[in-house]
Image (cartoon, rainbow, N blue to C red):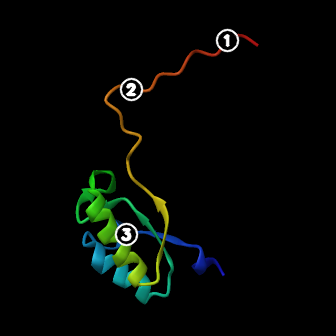
Amino acid sequence: MIWDRLGIITDEVSANVSEALDWIAGCGLRHVEIRTVNGRNVMDLTNEEIGDLRERIERRGLYVSAIASDCRTAEQPITYPKAGRL
């Protein structure tokens, strides 16, 4: 069934990650996508905070399907070479 595979972005449910995880688990869903945790980008979390988040996710029987962070942002813009003639 599709509900077994649907990943929910936690901060789209609530800015409070615990509230979001409770709601997702309460709906019978199983997968979460993590982008921000209590207003902070997941890429900025410490190892200790990541461990705490993992415990909270696993305690509810949930799985992380994706890290939906804006990790592609760079100080320099990405440039691509111009395509040559075929």
Q: For the point 27% across and 63% down, which residue is it?
A: 48
Question: Closer to the N terminus: mark 1 or mark 2?
Answer: 2
9 left or right, relative to 46: right
Which residue was labeled with disc 2?
A: 77
The residue lying furthest to the right in this view is 86
Give the quarter of the image for residue 54: bottom left
Q: Earlier in the sequence, mark 2 or mark 3?
A: 3
Q: Which residue is mark 1?
A: 84
Amino acid on which the number 1 mark rests in the picture? Gly
How far apart in space, not on screen, are marks 1 and 2 (Cα)? Answer: 22 Å
Q: Relative to 4, is 45 above or below?
A: above
Give, as a three-letter code, the residue at label 2. Answer: Pro
Q: Quadrant of the C terminus?
A: top right
Q: Which mark is residue 64?
A: none
The kind of residue on which mark 3 rests is Thr
Please tell me which residue lies in front, 20 or 46. 46
Dot 2 crowding, Cα within 10 Å, few <14, some 14–19, many 20+: few
| Residue visible at 29% across and 78% down in the picture | 18
User: Which residue has dot 3 on it?
Assistant: 10
Q: Viewer-proximal residue, 83 or 60?
A: 60
Rendered image quadrant of residue 56 = bottom left
